[in-house]
Every structure is written in C-alpha cells, then in structure tokens.
Amino acid sequence: MEILNFLKEYWVLISFFVGEIGALIIFAKVVLKILKCSLRNDMLDIWDRCKDKKQITRYQLQSFLYSYDLYKKLKGNSFIDEIKERIEKFDVID
C-alpha cells in the first residue's frame, strides 16, 4: 500500500526522471557513433594521403595508431584492420 501511495504522489517526478535518463542514454549512444565516425574519417584521410606513395610520416602514423586504438575500444567495425596492416608496411619518413 505504501508503494502505491508513493507512486500516486510522485508519478510525475518519476516519469520525468525516467524520460530524462532515457534521453541521456540515447544522447550518449549518438555521441559514441559520432566519435567513431570522426575517428574513422581521420584514419581514412591519412590512408588516402599516403596510399599512392606508400610513405607515411611518423606523426601521421602515430595519429593513425592512436585513432585506431580508440576506434577499436569503441567497438568499431573491422574493415579498418586491413588498412592498418597495410599502413604499418609503409616507409616511415620524417
């Protein structure tokens, strides 16, 4: 009976907080998708600039590898693995 009285008194606040938590969860999922997309675009940009000459600067390689690690931690898909394997075989220039 106490639970019913509590729900009767505070149903507006309870539904507001449940709605807010749901909105935060959806927002967090969208932000993670945006972050993965941005990391993937950065890695593909480095790939596009270096693939013809098969040369990469040390800073581009470092940037690619940092982005790759974060991308994989965010459970990014595996098509970027093949690009990573190819980039690691490039000549590193200064």
Image (spheres, rainbow, N blue to C red):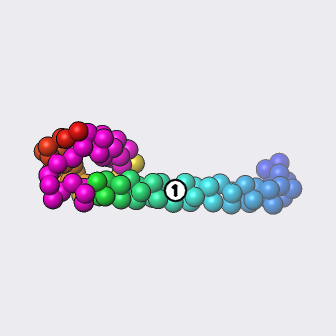
Q: In the image, what residue occupies the spot 75% across and 59% down? A: 16
Give the SS element for disc 1: helix
- For badge 1, the amino acid type reads Val
**Residue 77 placement (x, y as % from top left):** 30, 56
Q: Answer with the quarter of the image where residue 41 lies.
A: bottom left
For the residue pair 64 and 60, the one nearer the viewer reads as: 60
Q: Which residue is mark 1?
A: 31
Task: Give the tally of numbered discs.
Answer: 1
Which residue is painted at 35% across and 55% down in the image?
Answer: 42
Left or right of 76: which side holds 2? Answer: right
Q: In the rendered image, is residue 65 in sight?
A: no
Does residue 22 appear left or right of residue 43 in this picture? Answer: right
Residue reaching furthest front? 94
Give 65 or 58, whichever is nearer the viewer: 58
| Residue 60 sits inside the magenta stretch | yes
The relative height of residue 69 versus residue 31 in the rendered view (above or below) is: above
Residue numbers of the magenta segment: 47-72
Can residue 12 be seen here?
yes
Q: Quadrant of residue 24?
A: bottom right
Q: Nearer the viewer, residue 54 or 17?
A: 54
